[in-house]
Image: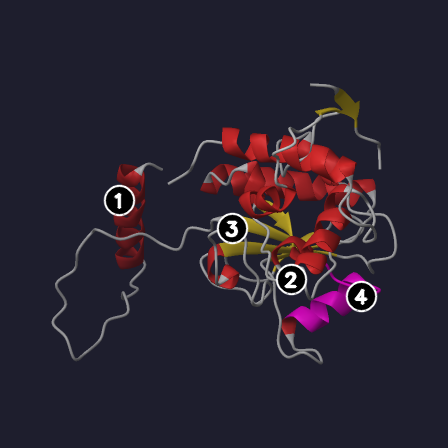
Amino acid sequence: MSKHRIGSTLPSGGHLRCACVAGLLLMAAGCRVPRNPLAEWLPSPNFNARRPQLVVLHHTAEATFEGALSCLKTSNSGGPASAHYLIGRDGRTAQLVSEDFRAWHAGGGSWGPYRDLNSLSIGIELDNNGSEPFPEVQIKALIVLLKDITGRYHIPPNLVVGHADVDPARKVDPSTFFPWRTLAEQGLGLWPDEWLEEPPASFDAWRALRHIGYSLQDEPATLRAFHIHYRGTPMGDLDAMDRRILFNLERKTEAIPSVN
C-alpha cells in the first residue's frame, strides 16, 4: 500500500488490600462507615471505590482562572458544573472535586461503550477562552497530571479524550488549538503516525469512527469533532486524508490491550 505523510496541522487482590487498609484507617481515625439503621451490619470485604475509566479534557471558555473557578464552584447559565481539576495558563493546578466522587463536566456524552461519563471519568478544565493557543507551561502541567492519573487508574491512551469527542453535537472544546500530538508523544491520547497507508477500497471510515469511540447519532457533528481533534479545523467533508487517518487510528485502537 502507498503511504502518505500527515501534515502538521490493581489487580483484584490489590483493590481488596486497599479496601481493608482504608477501612482500618477509618476506624483508627474514629470514623464510622455509613450504614443503614434498617439493616443488620454484616460487612463484606468484596468491594472497591469508584475507579475512573477515562479522562475528559475541556477548555473553560472564561477569561481568567478566577472566573473559571467561580463558575465551577457556583453555577452558570446552564446550571451548576464542576470538574475534578482546573489548570491555569501559568500551570497552576487546583483540585475541585475528589476523584472518588462525580464531577458534573461531561453531561450526556458517550465514548464507545461508556455512558454516564460523569460517573466514569475524571474531568480536567484548562483555563483557555477557546480562541488562543495553550501556553507550554500549562500543557506541561497537564501532562504531569495526566501521567499521574492514567498511571494510577491504568487508563489507556485511547481513553484520554476531549469534550467535543464525547459530546460532538454540543461541544467544541478543547478547541482546534489544543496540542493533541504533544500529548500523544507522551503516551496520552491517540495521534496518527507521520506516514499513513492508503486504506483498502473496502475500508469503512464511519465504522472506524464508531470503533475508535465516536457516536454516530449525529454524523455531521461527529465529523466536525473528529476534524477539531485530528485536522485542526471544524470544517470539511470526509476526505481521503480522513480515511487514511482513521485507518491508522483504528489499527492503533485495536492494538491497545483491554483493561479490566
Q: Residue furthest right?
A: 132
The mark nearer the N terminus, 3 or 1, is 1
Question: In the rendered structure, which amino acid carries the disc numbered 1?
Answer: Leu
The mark nearer the N terminus, 4 or 2, is 4
134 shown above or below 76: above
Mark closer to the observer (3, 1): 3
Quadrant where the N terminus lies? top right
Q: Which segment did they paint magenta?
A: 59-72
Mark 2 neighbour density, 10 Å: few (under 14) some (14–19) many (20 or more): few
Mark 1 and mark 4: Cα distance apart in space: 42 Å
Mark 3 and mark 1: Cα distance apart in space: 29 Å
The mark nearer the N terminus, 2 or 3, is 3
For label 1, the SS is: helix
For label 2, the SS is: loop
Question: In the rendered structure, which amino acid carries the disc numbered 3?
Answer: Gly
Mark 3 and mark 4: Cα distance apart in space: 30 Å
Numbered tag placed on residue 175 in the rendering: none
The residue that label 2 is drawn on is 218
The residue that label 1 is drawn on is 16
Residue 58 position within the rendered picture, expressed as x and y whole percent measured from the top left: 69, 56
The residue that label 3 is drawn on is 112
The residue that label 4 is drawn on is 62
